[in-house]
Image (spheres, grey):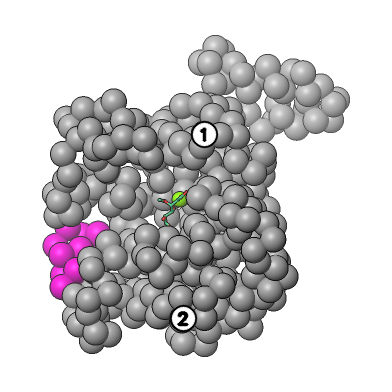
Amino acid sequence: MSQFKFSVGPWNVHAGADSYGPPTRQEIDFDTKLAKFAELGFSAIQFHDDDAVPNINDYTEEQIKEKARELKKKLDKYGLAAEFVAPRLWMDEHSIDGGFMSTSAEDREYAMWRAYRSIDIARELDCDMIVLWLAREGTLCAESKSPVWATRQLIEAINKMLAYDPKIRVCIEPKPNEPIDRSICGTMGHVMAISAATIDPSRVGGNLESAHAILAGLDPAHEIGFALAMGKLMTVHLNDQNGIRYDQDKTFGVENLRAAFNQVKVLKENGYGSHGEYVGLDVKAMRTTTDEDCYKHLENSLKIFRALEKKVDRFDYDFQKKCVETRDFEALEMYVMNLLMGID
Ligand code: 3MF
Ligand code: MG
């Protein structure tokens, strides 16, 4: 039995469209996804603001809260919690050149409107976390925006969110690029620096996504460890990624099993989850996957995570200690390989 609770977002089951081609599978309605997520063993759902309240621009603030209350009843029916709400700033015509650091003052105001509405929705869903994946916060043309100004805009936007609700926590999901060329907050180190510069660092932390760390040329387990050391790992987006290329959101562990093992290991060793944190997945089915198999990547990620938990349980810390004392890292490395390959 896993010691962890798992979470997932409705976007993790999608119809297979990519930048180069149309959908390959049927759309699945939201209620069907919720029922299936509960059946697969997930405890919480991650939301974009407009997953929670579709067509959010068409409603008043009161109507948005009312819609969120209806959603809460639905979640209760399935015994699911809401883990976070994330303003989906990258889809709207007001965020073509970014949200909080858009060059248009009107568009920056719109971004704050979405951030405040996300907080309102979170409150109704009984959750206290806003995730900021800063998709378009950066530059497409390096000279179009000052990185100094843009960084300060981000800090100011977060300060406004912290002031709007004294309980809300802001969790940045760093990513170095895509869809932007150069992002402003690309790694966990950036997140920690931004956190320290806000009016309440205790309420600003990070969401480490394995693929995003790899895109930055970093090791996901070390990024997780860094945020844990700062007491600021609020959630994780586990998945996998084949090197520095387009964002793949592969099933957890399929590309680099040892790196996946080390992510599970660092989470387990440091009691991640003991303050209610979830192990979140952010995985995508392949375009070739059939309708029947459209949840397989989630099932497989859970299976691989749980299998790796068992490997962590079997990890021989005495042997590790001995290897460290004698600096026999060759032996330690082979021990890890044997553990992962199932060779005793
Ligand atoms: C993009 C992502 C996003 C975010 C999600 C929640 C589509 O690389 O990882 O997933 O995780 O929008 O903020
Ligand atoms: Mg993600």
Q: Which residue is mark 1?
A: 241
* Residue at the right extreme of this rendering: 326
Range of magenta residues: 69-81
Residue 101, position as x, y percentages in the image: 57, 71
Can residue 336 be seen in the rendering of this structure? yes
- The answer as to whether callout 2 falls within 8 Å of ligand 1 is no
> Which residue is pictured at 21% across the width and 60% down the height?
79
Residue occupying the point 20% across, 35% down: 25
**Where 242 falls versus 137 (above or below)?**
above
**Residue 170 horizontal/vertical position (percent):** 51, 71
* Tag 2 residue: 106
State the residue in front, 315 or 169: 169
- Could you tell which of marks 2 and 1 lies nearer the N-terminus? 2
Counting from the top left corner in percent of width and height, residue 189 is at 69, 57
Label placed on residue 213: none
Residue 320: x %, y % from top left: 71, 29
In the image, what residue occupies the spot 41% across and 70% down? 94
Left or right? Give the position of 121 relative to 230. left
Of 189 and 126, nearer the camera is 189
At 67% across and 41% down in the image, what residue appears?
Answer: 218
Classify 299 as above or below 200: above
Amino acid tagged 1: Gln
Horizontal relation, residue 322 to residue 166: left or right:
right
Helix, strand, or loop for circle 2? helix
Residue 233 seen by the camera = no
Q: Is residue 188 left or right of residue 330?
A: left
State which quadrant residue 159 falls in.
bottom right
Magenta region, mostly helix, strand or loop? helix
Q: Quadrant of the image for the N terminus?
A: top left
Residue type at mark 2: give it.
Glu
Instruction: Work out whether 99 lies above or below 292.
Output: below
